[in-house]
Image: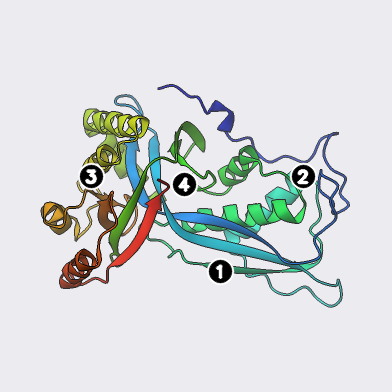
Amino acid sequence: MRDPAGSHRPRPPEPPGRDGPPPDGRGRAGRPPPKGTVSGVCHGTLGELYQGPLRAGGEPDIALVSFPVNRHSWVYFTPRDATGPPPASPLGKKAATAARLFLRHYGLTLPPGVWSTHSELRVGVGMASSTADVVATLRCLYRVFGLPYDPDVVLGVLAGIERADSVFLDEFALHLSGRHRVVRRLGTDIGFHTAFVTEPGTVDTQAVTGRLLAHYRRRGEEYERCLTDLLKGFDSGDAAAVARAATLSATLSQEVLPKATFGELLAHRERFGADGVFVAHTGCLTGYLFTRRPDPDLACDLSAFFHSLGHQCSFAQGGYG
């Protein structure tokens, strides 16, 4: 498969070289630290439209087409006087590590200030909450120091922390999560309305990686056809074709990481006029894809259906179109 986004292979964060900024709290643009609060924001995901091997045969990589959702993580930094002990940081462990790697890479010292955070993303269910927290933290730091956002540096930081979704990009992408490499950008033409539920529990992606890879080897040809159809749908701007391919990817995932409600959703898809079914392949989300917004009557019917399965229905817009 071609690699037009080869420039987005990660480079590990390194100390600054001779062209790096001086460690005086200023960025390369020479801008002093801000006088007011700055923010970094990053969207999360509703699982994936595709998770599977990049190609059939051999030793597969885990490839993703994450499903961006209009729900976000926010990180704020407010400068303060350097008097008294610094307040405790609310940043999670991974976000705090990302901040340290960023400062080391650019040779910068964070000015005195206070961090604060807010998130609409549930942890451990497939919404890319930890990756979104990391990216929001980095975007906040870029604004603190007046530096241009550099996706290569962000990828390098993520590579030092965790397997990651492609939420550092504001478009769909085919992405190797373990290698932190963008294989192909897929643009912003496709969008969906969704009705979804979150099943109980969490999934440890690292713990199930071996099972996933063995499943990909067994089902390599089906996954290859699925990915081909998905990419054709993106290339032609055909959201319904993308939804059909996402449904096949979700169905294949049932064989290795089943969702309790998936069978009922699939059986009733035509009843509700949904264009497809999606899941968080290594998470707890499952729901319907609609190319048109459900009207109030349909929203009520969907909510009642999910309630009959023991779950509260949520609605959200995914993608970009």
Compared across the picture, whether 164 is left or right of 221 comes to right
x, y percent for residue 62: 38, 38
The front one of 195 and 126 is 195
Q: Is residue 65 above or below residue 138?
A: above
Q: Residues within 10 Å of mark 1 (few under 14, many from 20)?
A: few
Task: Point out which mark residue 165 bears.
Answer: 4
Identify residue for label 2. Answer: 106
Label whose residue precedes the other's in the sequence (4 or 2): 2
Measure the C-alpha gap from mark 4 to mark 2: 24 Å
Label whose residue precedes the other's in the sequence (4 or 1): 1
Q: Tell me the kind of residue under disc 4.
A: Asp
Q: Is residue 97 above or below residue 6?
A: below
Measure the C-alpha gap from mark 3 to mark 2: 43 Å
Q: Tell me the kind of residue under disc 2.
A: Tyr
Residue at 27% over, 71% down? 312
Give the quadrant of residue 293: bottom left
x, y percent for residue 71: 46, 60
Residue at 27% over, 57% down? 286
Looking at the image, which residue sits at the far top? 2
Which quadrant of the figure contains the N terminus?
top left
Q: Is residue 273 above or below residue 73?
A: above
Label whose residue precedes the other's in the sequence (3 or 4): 4
Residue 150 visible in the shown view: yes
Q: Is residue 175 above or below residue 270?
A: above
- What kind of element bears circle 4? loop
Task: Point out which mark residue 118 bears.
Answer: 1
Task: Tell me if label 3 and label 4 are in contact, CB under 8 Å.
Answer: no
Which quadrant of the figure contains the C terminus?
top left
- What kind of element bears circle 2? helix
